Image (cartoon, grey):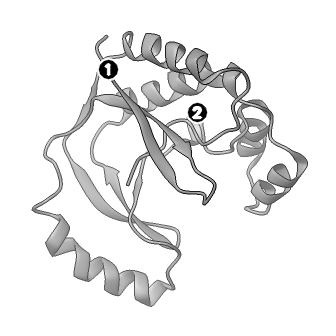
């Protein structure tokens, strides 16, 4: 369960260099705080999304993408073709070519995914069932106070490698 700021990428260079850059970045960034999280329907899936002004969170995400991009191998043609199946806007296509992912910078929307794709009726029923359970559990305020580095194993599962407190 995670919120992605910098999308998964293939590493160029060493993990140690990435970790050093990530630690240095986290030391310059202050935490972001919003009033809370809300259960939201995003297209065909459900997610928790921040309430209120997300400017500071978006700034952290953009700075993370920029600062770590030199560690990212360019996407291959298969990955580009797969991403383009989503009927990208011109801005998303530009992000894909520049940053390797369409939903960064101005296209970024922080979310914590709760479900896979659901038909409309099932999404609405699931939302109605989850809302009363999640509402008292959702943090108020919601504070994003660390960047986490994850690695992917051979089975495609993510594992936490290190957590970096935002101390700027």
Inter-mark Cα distance, 2 to 1: 20 Å
Please tell me how crowded label 2 is: few (under 14), some (14-19), or many (20+) other residues with Cα within 10 Å: many
Q: Residue 90 vs residue 67: left or right?
A: right
Residue at 40% x, 49% y: name it.
2
Indicate left or right for 14 with 22 as reference.
Answer: right
- Which residue is denoted by mark 2 in the rendering? 105
Question: Which residue occupies 15% across, 41% down?
Answer: 141
Q: Quadrant of residue 166?
A: top left
Mark 1 Cα shell of 10 Å, populated few (<14), some (14-19), many (≥20): many
If the image is split into quadrants, where does the C terminus sit?
top left
Which residue is denoted by mark 1 in the rendering? 166
Residue at image x 56%, y 18%?
16
Disc 1 secondary structure class: loop
Q: Secondary structure at mark 2?
A: helix
Q: Position of residue 108 (x, y in %)?
A: 53, 41
Which quadrant does the N terminus fall into? Answer: bottom left
**Most foreground residue, 18 or 130:** 18
- Residue 61 lies left or right of residue 13; in this view the side is left
Q: Mark 2 vs mark 1: give the one in front.
A: 1
Closer-to-camera residue (137/52): 137
Q: Quadrant of residue 69?
A: top right
In the rendered image, residue 51, in percent from the top left (x then y), is placed at: 27, 47
Vertical placement of residue 144 versus 88, above or below: above
Which residue is most to the right? 77
Residue 82 in which image quadrant: bottom right
Q: Work out whether mark 2 precedes mark 1 in sequence or the reverse, and give the earlier one.
A: 2
């Amino acid at each position: 369960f995670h919120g992605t700021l910098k999308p998964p990428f293939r590493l160029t260079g060493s993990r140690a260099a990435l970790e050093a850059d990530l630690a240095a970045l986290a030391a310059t960034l202050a935490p972001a705080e919003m009033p809370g999280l809300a259960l939201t329907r995003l297209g065909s899936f459900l997610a928790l999304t921040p309430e209120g002004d997300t400017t500071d969170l978006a700034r952290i995400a953009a700075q993370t993408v920029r600062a770590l991009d030199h560690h990212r191998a360019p996407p291959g043609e298969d990955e580009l073709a797969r991403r383009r199946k989503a009927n990208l806007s011109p801005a998303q296509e530009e992000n894909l070519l520049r940053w390797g992912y369409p939903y960064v910078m101005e296209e970024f929307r922080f979310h914590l995914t709760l479900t896979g794709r659901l038909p409309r009726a099932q999404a609405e029923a699931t939302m109605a069932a989850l809302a009363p359970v999640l509402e008292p559990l959702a943090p108020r305020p919601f504070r994003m106070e660390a960047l986490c580095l994850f690695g992917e194993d051979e089975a495609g599962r993510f594992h936490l490698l290190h957590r970096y407190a935002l101390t700027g």
